[in-house]
Amino acid sequence: MNHDEEDRITAVNRHLKGDKATDICKDMNRSKSWFFKWVNKFNRGGEEWYKSQSKAPKNHGGKINKDIETAVISIRKSLVIF
């Protein structure tokens, strides 16, 4: 577990104990938006709520159908002026 994950767990545990959000943020030198992001993730559930999610695209753009690709190439070649 890395330092960021430990901070997230600590912040949420303090929140569950009744500490004020402003006190938690000030003590941990974090923003309110950071704090509430992790409280909301905790509230939504999940075993590993404290872990970062990949921001990489889930879908990697589609490929063009081979027939369409061939048609586009042939049209482009016919448009070339010598």
Image: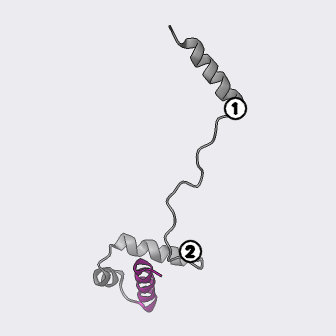
| Image coordinates for residue 5, horizontal then vertical, percent | 45, 79
Amino acid type at mark 1: Lys
Check if residue 76 falls in the magenta segment: no
The secondary element bearing badge 1 is classed as: helix
Task: Provide residue 80's location: percent of width, then percent of height.
Answer: 53, 13
The residue segment tinted magenta is 1-18
**Residue pictured at 53% horizontal, 76% vertical:** 49
Residue 4 % position (x, y): 41, 77
Q: Earlier in the sequence, mark 1 or mark 2?
A: 2
Residue 14 versus residue 78 in the image, above or below: below
Q: Residue at x 39, y 75 (%)?
A: 35
Vertical position of residue 27 compared to residue 66: above or below: below
Residue at label 1?
Answer: 66
From what the image shows, is residue 33 above or below residue 61?
A: below
Instruction: Write down the residue under mark 2.
Output: 44
Q: Secondary structure at mark 2?
A: helix
What is the magenta segment's predominant secondary structure? helix
Estimate the spatial distance between the alpha carbons at disc 1 and disc 2, rounded to whole Å. Answer: 43 Å
Amino acid of disc 2 = Arg
Give left or right: position of 2 versus 73.
Answer: left
For the point 38% across and 72% down, which residue is it? 34
Name above or below for residue 7 compared with residue 80. below
Instruction: Residue 14: name its quadrant.
Output: bottom left
